Image: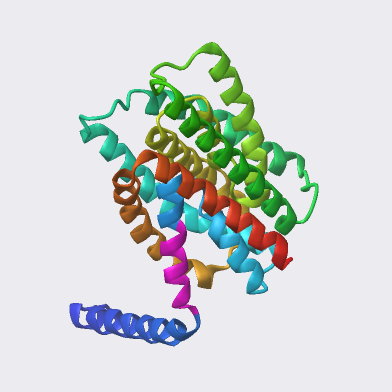
Amino acid sequence: MFSLTRRHLTIISATVISLLLCWYIYQVNAYSAYSLLGMLGALFANATGAGGGVIFIPAFQQLGITPEQSVATSFAIQCFGMTTGTVMWLNHAKTCRVEDWSLLPSLSFLCLPFAILGIWTVYGLELSSPGSVSYLFAYFSIFIGVGLLYTGFKKLRSEKQKAPTQEKKQVNYQDKMALVVLSYLGGILTAWLSVGVGEIIAFYLIFRGYRVTLAIAVAVVLSAGAVWSGIGYHIYENNIYWSVLYFAGPGAVIGGILAKKLATSIPVFQLKMFFACWVFVAGSIELLVN
């Protein structure tokens, strides 16, 4: 009776590894650019709170990938990038002694269940989006960008006229109710676009006077939980563009690691304006192109 020896196992393993290496080298020419795309998407997403779909969706649309594949693949890539970003932000919150991060867990646990509920309202009831992915994404991005630019310059003007207001340290009842509703609506948008809930919550927290880095961290944690809650649906529907994910996923991990350093190194006002301008420009380009 034939039995596998250590030598046989070594030969089989070497053969499998060689075949995989050949396949990888063959695929690099066609898909290596997606590694950079994944890294850039995760870098901007985890540094600003805007989901990686802000970069992925327009790129995929231009490459001719179907809207369903674009959203599903964006979900999958963000499972890598936003999860890495979440780990980095939580580690920063745990070790940082300069800023108060006590609201991060409470805000995350408040928002996440309702974001997941919004996502599965769409998937469970099979609700279709009110328009095409391209136009819905564009208008949403422009709205968020304009709102953030307005609040940023409004706060800057008020600070020139009087002493700057202190950052909020507690979540009142009004904010809790608003965050619940916005998380649910953001979850619905995320199901359609792969982005939405993180941007909406970050915008609201900044608008209400919470620290910008706290708002970004909450958005990152929330986005990570949201995409993980919906990825099973996209795997079941077989809409993920796996060849893109194989390269963009590892790139997103690198971007997620670098993003926290970027976000904590930029002054608060510049970070807020960077976030607003990026979302606005991405939406405007998408609207003009389509």
The image's colour scheme reads rainbow
Query: Eyeballing the image, is 63 above or below 167?
Result: below
Give the main secondary structure of the magenta stretch. Answer: helix
Residue at 54%, 18% (x, y): give it.
176
Residue 82 in sight here: no
Q: Horizontal and vertical percent for residue 65?
A: 66, 70
Query: Eyeballing the image, is 204 above or below 251?
Result: above
Q: How many marks?
A: 0
Residue 78 in sight here: yes
Q: Point out the image quarter for the N terminus.
A: bottom left
Residue at 27%, 39% (x, y): give it.
91
Q: Which residues are magenta?
A: 31-41
Query: Eyeballing the image, is 160 above or below 131?
Result: above
Judging depth in this view, the residue of 226 and 289 nearest the camera is 289
Judging depth in this view, the residue of 209 and 165 nearest the camera is 165
In the image, 260: left or right of 112?
left
Q: Is residue 173 magenta?
A: no
